[in-house]
Image (spheres, rainbow, N blue to C red):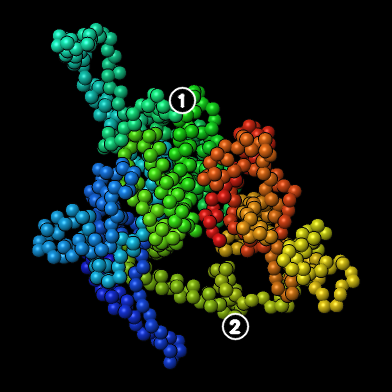
Amino acid sequence: MPPPYAADVITLQHLLKSTVTELVRTYDGLLIHTADLFGEVLVRVAIVVVIADLGAIRMLCGYVSISATLFCLHCPCTDDEIEHLDLSRWLPRTNVKNREIIGEWQAAKTIKDCDTITKRSGLRWSKLYRLPYWDSVNSVSIGIMHNLLEGVLERHLQVFWGIGPPEKVIKKQAAMAQDELDILSSFTQHDANEELRDLEEESCQSSQSGGASAPSTISSSDVNMDELYTGHSLNNDFPMDDLSTVQDSDSSGDSDYVDYSSLPAEFPPVSLAAICLCISQLELPTCVGRPPTNLGEKSHGSLKADNILVLFTVVFPMCLPEIWARVGSSAEHDGQMQGLLRNFVHLVAATNIAFAYETSNADADKFEQQYIVYRRTRTHIWPHHHSVPNDQIAHHIAAALRYFGPLPQLSEFAGESENGKMATVPTNNWLYDMGQTILLSIACRARLEARINDGAPDQPWLQQLYDILRPSALSSTPTQSELLATHVKAPTLSSDNYALVLAHVNRNLPLWRDCYDFPHPYGSKSLTPYARILHHIIHKNRTFAVRASHLGNSSIMFHSPQDFNTVGSGFIEAIWSMLLDGVERIFILVAAHQELSTEDQLCDPFIKHPALLTCLIYTEPSADKGIIEPAHIMCHVPLYKCPSGTFGIAHDVYVMNGALNRKRK
């Protein structure tokens, strides 16, 4: 696209013309010559799904802006109906209906007619409609990164909780506070007296006409000028344009009713300090980026999408239940905190479902239920804040789960990563050479990565350079002699550890004998007692280490070798490399996490909220130890240490969170 500014809708469609023409041609198939001189293969190219942020999707796929009346890509919900939570009131958009409307748009004679159709339907022409297979509804990804993380969750953090509110929110709050001060300063005592006289006259007229009310006896001396206007201030919730969209009536007769009108708009400093302390002391694996420890301050800049995901699925579930469970000054305060917790639990449950790597129609139904309850309880707690388009669009994640399956593979993370790489390419402000500069850098990088992956077995010095540039690059497989050389001086396992490894390798079929069990029958196999000690391993691009080396990398969740459907958790105590039949195998000694006693489990506040995927364990591991292999590892398990007395438990405990698994196989 021509720099320096982004293309508008019309320019983008012109730029798409040649690309779409090529896509139409390649959909029927092209014969491509292969490396074999006599071979050809039929190649067909098609657009399966469009993955982008909401703005780019609308410009590319022919939808109107998110600020328009018909803002939703998936249903005809209007901006004045956004508070309704029953999706059945709107018929979902369909590709057939959209193409009918686009046909009318193309047949329109004037630009005014086209604009009329666009305003009525929320659709405009896109070059993608030239593709016969293009589904304008189901081939468009919602984009859970921009919609759910940087939309719903970030707004919940900044606007509803008041942690690091955006600058425009602060400015609007200050402007409204200043307006109130101006009104207050202009409202004189004479104006107050005039208003009171008018009220007395209305009251007298009402009495004379048979009304039951008595004349007002309030005098001007009883009026406190500072109490005449008690509107919004800097400490109130951020006011939106339609404050009257949703109003919760006071149900004084309902025993479950909680009044949130006195709820502060921001986290108290003590609570925010406790969250920052949790972030700084949380035992995280090295593969997970730690959110800023000064959360809520301007100095840390904008939060990245992965920081928001870690905050809402790991950090907050591990600390907020304890913060909100602290006994307050009144029963009303405690009820408010429990309401905040329930609202938060529903949001976390929906987020974990949306970002899971395995899903089903039942999970999609659960997401819909959890998200609707989240929005309903949010409206009850913060009636000042109206919903925004992202809130409505997120409802359609359930339909996307049913249609696409797991959504992380269709998220924008991969594309944003490539954007980050391109942003580092120096351009020297040569705007009209920028495209060529970036493309040249990408091509050079791709050629280098290809050579590193191919390796250089005939040039050892070059292979050493490749290994430095990318340690995980494909290198020559160690020979038998090289493996023996690395294990010949390996130490001997202790008798207890040797017995555990022997039981593990014989769990399905007893092929290996104890090397100390003499005499050995002819042709039998004895398990070597020698094992090379490792301090860490890399499995599926994740580092796993022994507990003495890195606590965060040692706390894991794993499948039981005896029953793959049984899941356990524990600390990695040791890692050994052993040769069995000349093949290297990695064995991991795991000490299981120690569960709370039955008595202490009564004090665990996380048991009531299983959707948080969080529980308490003792800091000391149990005496139960076992052997697993890298294939049994599921994920890391973050830990947060709480001293004795926390939760009313007389022992040091860890808060353990299992959300990093996200239903990975």
The residue at which mark 1 appears reads as 332
Residue 387 in percent (x, y) is at 32, 42
The residue at which mark 2 appears reads as 458
Q: Quadrant of the C terminus?
A: bottom right
Res. 355 visible in picture: no
Name the quadrant containing residue 140: bottom left
Name the quadrant containing residue 241: top left
- 10 Å crowding of disc 1: few (<14), some (14-19), many (20+): some
Name the quadrant containing residue 445: bottom left
Who is closer to the viewer here, 441 or 146?
Answer: 146
Query: Which residue is pictured at 28% across the width and 31% down the height?
Result: 176
Residue 331 in percent (x, y) is at 49, 24
Q: Secondary structure at mark 1?
A: helix
Who is closer to the viewer here, 188 or 325?
Answer: 325
Above/below status of 258 relative to 146: above
Residue 602 in percent (x, y) is at 62, 35
Query: Which residue is pictured at 44% across the width and 29% down the height?
Result: 256
- The type of residue carrying mark 2 is Asp
Residue 412 in percent (x, y) is at 40, 59
- The type of residue carrying mark 1 is Glu
Q: Is residue 660 left or right of residue 127?
A: right
Mark 1 or mark 2, earlier in chain:
1
How far is the residue under mark 1 from the one under mark 2? 76 Å
In the image as oriented, which residue stretches furthest toward the left?
109
Label ID, residue 249: none
- 10 Å crowding of disc 2: few (<14), some (14-19), many (20+): few
Res. 65 visible in picture: yes
The nearer-to-camera label among 1 and 2 is 1
